[in-house]
Image: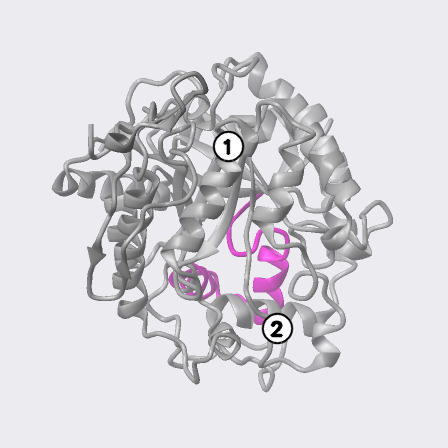
Amino acid sequence: MARTDRETMNLGVFFKNTGHHIAAWRHPDAQADAGINIQHYAECAVTSEQAGFDFLFFADSAAVRDKVSNDVLSRSSQYTAYFEPTTLLSALAMVTKHIGLVATATTSYNEPYHVARKYASLDHISGGRAGWNVVTSGNASEALNFGRDAHYGHGERYHRAKEFVEVVRGLWDSWDDDAFLYDKERGTFFDPAKLHQLDHVGQHFKVRGPLNIARPPQGHPVIFQAGTSEDGRELAAATAEGVFTSELTREESRAYYRDVKGRMKRYQRSPDQMRIMPGCTVFCGETEAEAKDRYDYLQSLIDPVVGREYIGGLLGMDLSDCPIDGPIPDRPSPRSDMGTFKNIVNMARREDLSIRQVYSRLAGSHGKLCLTGSAVQIADIMQDWFENDACDGFILQPSYMPGDLDHMSRVLIPELKNRKLCREGYDGTTLRANLGLERPRSRYS
């Protein structure tokens, strides 16, 4: 399924407290307390907007990671302390004017009314810049924080998620766009004919409505999704407007692109209603040698036991009893049907990689694409993927924050702009406008 003839790619930036590299917090120029440092995030958000990114993005988890020793956990910054993202994005909306604000909220351990209200509020606070990344919680530990003894099964999680999104969208349509009159002379605050009660009764949820906030400026905040399993692809085809992917080669990404966009027709959707954006960590320099030096230095900071645990987490496997210089074992995994699992295992088998070699390869990217080179070399690869229907853009992942974000904004983004691969300024006032997505009409129109 070919991309529509859009001339410029979309670019997001994925904020992960100290950065995406597993040793990022140890870098001398990293902000070690980034997860709870609002000034750090404010400065990074302003940098990202000045560079012209379409949006910034925060992942989330509702649990401290367990099933790993506290000794290993204590050597990493990525699984412990960080802000709840919709709260954080509301603050960042006050220091930015144009950049989109996207955050994760799980459908497994939330209720549709809560999510609908939070993201509608963020959309109003930001003037139409909110996006919701729909996830189904791969971290089984979250169940123990929400009154459950066990995590939802894979299929059940996705069935629940599909209905969850339907309910949230219905709640966002509770009020017509022009429902609020604020007519002081007549004493009419809103037109009662333009208020709608949802009365949803489904397999997983029963929600009356209406939502107690006006319809969002974008109609609906933009829906993102990141699943690469079979269920995840189907959910993306049915609901997503932006998709974060983890393919490691151009051909794998082209196949994903054709597959997911090809499924959209069965949901009465067209391919131009979705932006597919692979995650990509870049180690970029003025020269290839400079980029390699930046990469090698971060690699030298990796603690081997943290590296092994990192790969175990990506695979859903306990590798603590495996030799670091041995292969990934042939074991059943609770994530064996997940796209990330398949991509990593296929790469390790194809190239006969040890656990150490796998974590060295993926240490900066959380299982996604990792590129090292000059701005020209990296732009060549990004252009090749974009022009050959492997993506609609990228979500770039700074290896450490704030230094790598600053460097990427100063070196790589100008190269992409020089090639006319991304726009010079913001096209509109909303995230939808800057992604080239239409504003949805209310179901009651």
Magenta stretch encompasses residue 347: yes
Q: CA distance from mark 2 to mark 1?
A: 40 Å
Please name the residue that numbered disc 1 is placed on: 124
Is the N terminus in the top left, top right, bottom left or bottom right quadrant? top left
Image quadrant of residue 171? top left
Looking at the rendering, the stretch of residues picked out in magenta corresponds to 342-370
Which is nearer the N-term, disc 2 or disc 1? 1
Residue 290 in the image: state x and y as whole percent. 76, 35
| Label 1 secondary element | helix
Q: Is residue 317 left or right of residue 392?
A: right
Please, which colouring scheme is shown? one colour
Q: Amino acid at mark 1?
A: His
Is the C terminus in the top left, top right, bottom left or bottom right quadrant? top left
Pick the front one: 349 or 312: 312
Residue 325 in the image: state x and y as whole percent. 62, 75
Q: Is residue 64 above or below residue 113?
A: below
Please name the residue that numbered disc 2 is placed on: 309
Residue at x 35% of width, y 28% of height = 388
Pick the front one: 372 or 192: 192
Q: How many C-alpha atoms fall within 10 Å of the one at disc 1: few (<14), some, or many (≥20)?
A: some
Pick the front one: 429 or 398: 429
